[in-house]
Image (cartoon, rainbow, N blue to C red):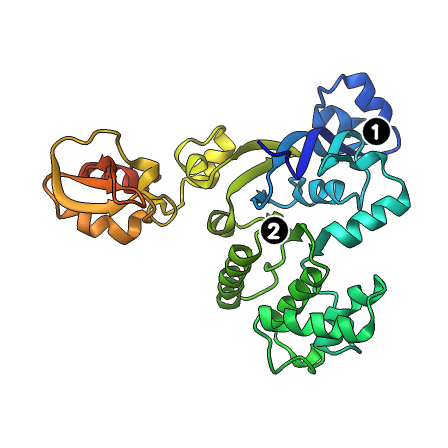
């Protein structure tokens, strides 16, 4: 098993004059209410997790849940109050300023909700800018920036100024700019939340296409559960600074760990999220002629399965039967987890 790219061990971020002392006195048992009464705000409370190479971890929660604070601790835009953070095995909190700047410039890319484009520079100049800061020759930086323009689908607009672009196009420039430095680790803090729903969906699709091609290690922050379900390999759900559950989208929907997580998931259209593999049985008896792939989203094959009298064979990528799914299982999965509104 390879070393995780990001590793957090018991990370705390507490705001307030006597935060450090209160954390030491608490022996790690941080009660947000007690801390608040003593003039401290708990941003992140005992977060421990790992992110593997090429994985997309989506951190979600409502405003004030601590998700952006956690990201800022891991990029060390803010210093954690306690715990350890490792980036590719390096102890982030022990790095001096020079090493930290090198790490950010060479390993990390960041995209925030505000596009923060330079208004007096064109698209291609905006994208080339971080390369020029690194000392790359102008000619080379422009050439690299043009590659990024093509990658995010802005060909023909490279000489536009930000004011001449739509919100979605500006966001693409922000993404291209952060990719130009070829980061191994990519931090995105609600990058699509300022966009209207149609453009947001396009950007999510574009983002998945880019990730499929580039295989970055990503931490993506959102407050939108549908967005998390669509993008994530795993989801961390935060509340009051605590990670309530960290799991695959399917497990979070099927097995919410807390009442808070259950409330998040109860309105989710399960058939749009879960794969056949997530709900199939191991049994291979009494099968009909129909076969479905384990990787199909339930919604796409539900109608076919519901017309069958026998169980349907579930096959892997080599067409080997690995289990079965019964029409009643589809009905229970789709309707069993919904709130009864009658």
Q: What residue is drawn where x is 86% and y is 44%?
A: 99
Q: What residue is drawn where x is 50% and y is 52%?
A: 227
Label 1 crowd (10 A; few <14 / some 14-19 / many >=20): many
Name the quadrant of the N terminus.
top right
Relative placement, left or right, of 192 versus 35 is left
Q: Position of residue 338 (x, y in %)?
A: 34, 40
Relative placement, left or right, of 176 versus 93 is left
Of 297 and 282, nearer the camera is: 282
Is tag 2's residue or tag 1's residue first in the polypeptide sequence?
Answer: 1
Instruction: Write down the quadrant of residue 203 in the picture.
Output: bottom right
**For the view shown, which residue lies furthest in the left direction?**
309
Q: Position of residue 10 (x, y in %)?
A: 70, 26
Relative placement, left or right, of 341 versus 147 is left
Q: Which residue is mark 1?
A: 19
Q: What residue is drawn where x is 50% and y is 66%?
A: 202
Of 226 and 157, nearer the camera is: 157
Q: Position of residue 309 (x, y in %)?
A: 9, 41
Q: Secondary structure at mark 2?
A: loop
Q: Which residue is mark 2?
A: 216
Instruction: Write down the quadrant of residue 62 in the picture.
Output: top right
Q: What residue is drawn where x is 83% and y is 71%?
A: 137
Q: CA distance from mark 2 to mark 1?
A: 35 Å
Name the quadrant of the C terminus.
top left
Instruction: Count all numbered tags in the image, as a single digit.
Output: 2
């Amino acid at each position: 098993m390879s070393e995780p790219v990001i590793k957090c061990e018991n990370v705390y971020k507490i705001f307030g004059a006597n935060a450090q002392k209160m954390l030491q006195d608490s022996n790690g048992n941080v009660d947000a209410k007690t801390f608040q009464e003593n003039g401290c705000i708990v941003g992140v409370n005992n977060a421990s997790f790992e992110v593997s190479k090429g994985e997309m971890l989506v951190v979600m929660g409502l405003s004030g849940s601590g998700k952006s604070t956690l990201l800022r601790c891991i990029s060390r835009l803010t210093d954690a109050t306690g715990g350890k953070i490792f980036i590719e095995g390096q102890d982030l909190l022990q790095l001096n300023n020079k090493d930290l700047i090198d790490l950010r410039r060479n390993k990390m890319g960041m995209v925030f909700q505000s596009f923060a484009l330079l208004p007096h520079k064109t698209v291609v100049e905006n994208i080339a800018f971080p390369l020029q800061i690194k000392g790359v020759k102008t000619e080379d930086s422009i050439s690299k920036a043009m590659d990024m323009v093509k990658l995010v689908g802005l060909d023909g607009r490279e000489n536009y100024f930000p004011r001449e672009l739509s919100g979605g196009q500006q966001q693409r420039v922000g993404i291209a700019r952060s990719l130009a430095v070829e980061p191994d680790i990519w931090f995105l803090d609600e990058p699509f939340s300022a966009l209207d729903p149609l453009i947001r969906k396009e950007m999510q699709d574009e983002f998945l296409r880019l990730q499929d091609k580039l295989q970055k290690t990503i931490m993506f922050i959102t407050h939108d559960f549908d967005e998390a379900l669509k993008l994530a390999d795993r989801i961390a759900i935060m509340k009051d600074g605590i990670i309530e559950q960290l799991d695959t989208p399917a497990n979070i929907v099927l097995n919410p760990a807390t009442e808070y997580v259950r409330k998040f998931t109860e309105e989710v259209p399960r058939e749009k999220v879960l794969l056949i593999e997530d709900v199939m049985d191991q049994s291979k008896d009494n099968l009909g002629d129909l076969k479905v792939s384990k990787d199909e989203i339930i919604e796409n094959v539900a109608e076919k399965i519901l017309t069958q009298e026998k169980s349907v064979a579930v096959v892997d990528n080599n067409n080997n039967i690995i289990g079965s799914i019964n029409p009643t299982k589809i009905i229970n999965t789709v309707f069993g987890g919904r709130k009864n509104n009658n």
